[in-house]
Image (tube, rainbow, N blue to C red):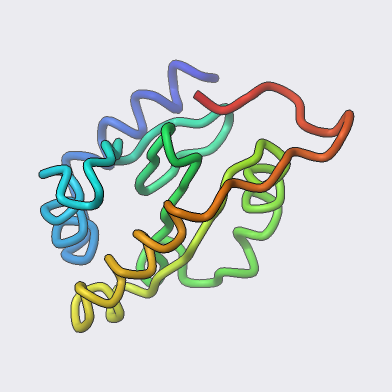
Amino acid sequence: MQRDLVRYAQQMRQQPTPAERALWQALRRGQLNGLKFRRQAPIERYIADFYCPLARLVIEIDGITHADPDADAPRDLWLKTQGLRVPHFWNNEVLTNLQGVLEIIADAARTPPPSPPAGGGGKEAR
C-alpha cells in the first residue's frame, strides 16, 4: 500500500493544480523563513499537498481534489494526533491572495506545533 501511495504522490506532482503550482513556486525557493517544504508528500497513509517536517506543518489546498473539507476531517485529526498543524486554503485564495496565504503559513510555522495526545499518537510523521 505504501508503494502505491508513493507512486500516486509522484503522479500528483506531475499534474499540479494552478494553485499548487503558484504556492510551490513561492515555497520552493526557501523564501518563507528558510523553511524547506515537500510537495505531494506521503505521510503514513495520506498525501499532504505541502509538508515542512522542521515546522511540523502540513498545508492543504482545497477546491479541486478536495471539494469538501469535511471529508478531510479524519485525515486532519490523524495528522494533528501526530503533532502537525494543518492549515487549509482554497484554490481561489491562493491564486488571488498569495502574499496573504504566505503570511498565514509563516505565522503557523512560528507557532509551536501541538503536542500529540498521550498514548494516541501512533507513528510519527516523517
Residue 14 or residue 98, whichever sits in front: 98
Q: Position of residue 18 (x, y in %)?
A: 16, 64
Give the side of residue 122 with respect to residue 49, left or right.
right
Residue lying farthest right?
A: 119
Q: Residue at x 52, y 55 (%)?
A: 111
- Position in image of residue 1 (x %, y %): 54, 20
Q: Quadrant of residue 47?
A: top left
* Closer to us: 8 or 120: 120
Q: Is residue 86 toward the left or the right of residue 38 in the image?
A: right
Q: Is residue 3 above or below residue 35?
A: above
Most distant residue in the top direction: 3
Instruction: Determine which quarter of the picture holds residue 91.
Output: bottom left
- Measuring 67% from the left and 60% from the top, which residue is drawn there? 73
Residue 102 is left or right of residue 88, and the answer is left
User: What is the total number of numbered labels drawn onto the structure image?
Assistant: 0
- List x then y, in percent, for residue 67: 47, 71
Asked if residue 76 lies left or right of residue 8, the reply is: right
Residue 39, position as x, y percentages in the image: 28, 40
Instruction: Tell me: residue 124, above or below residue 25.
Output: above
Residue depicted at 56% across the width and 69% down the height: 69
Q: Residue at x 49, y 62 (%)?
A: 87
The answer to which image quadrant residue 118 occupies is: top right
- Front one among 118 and 89: 118
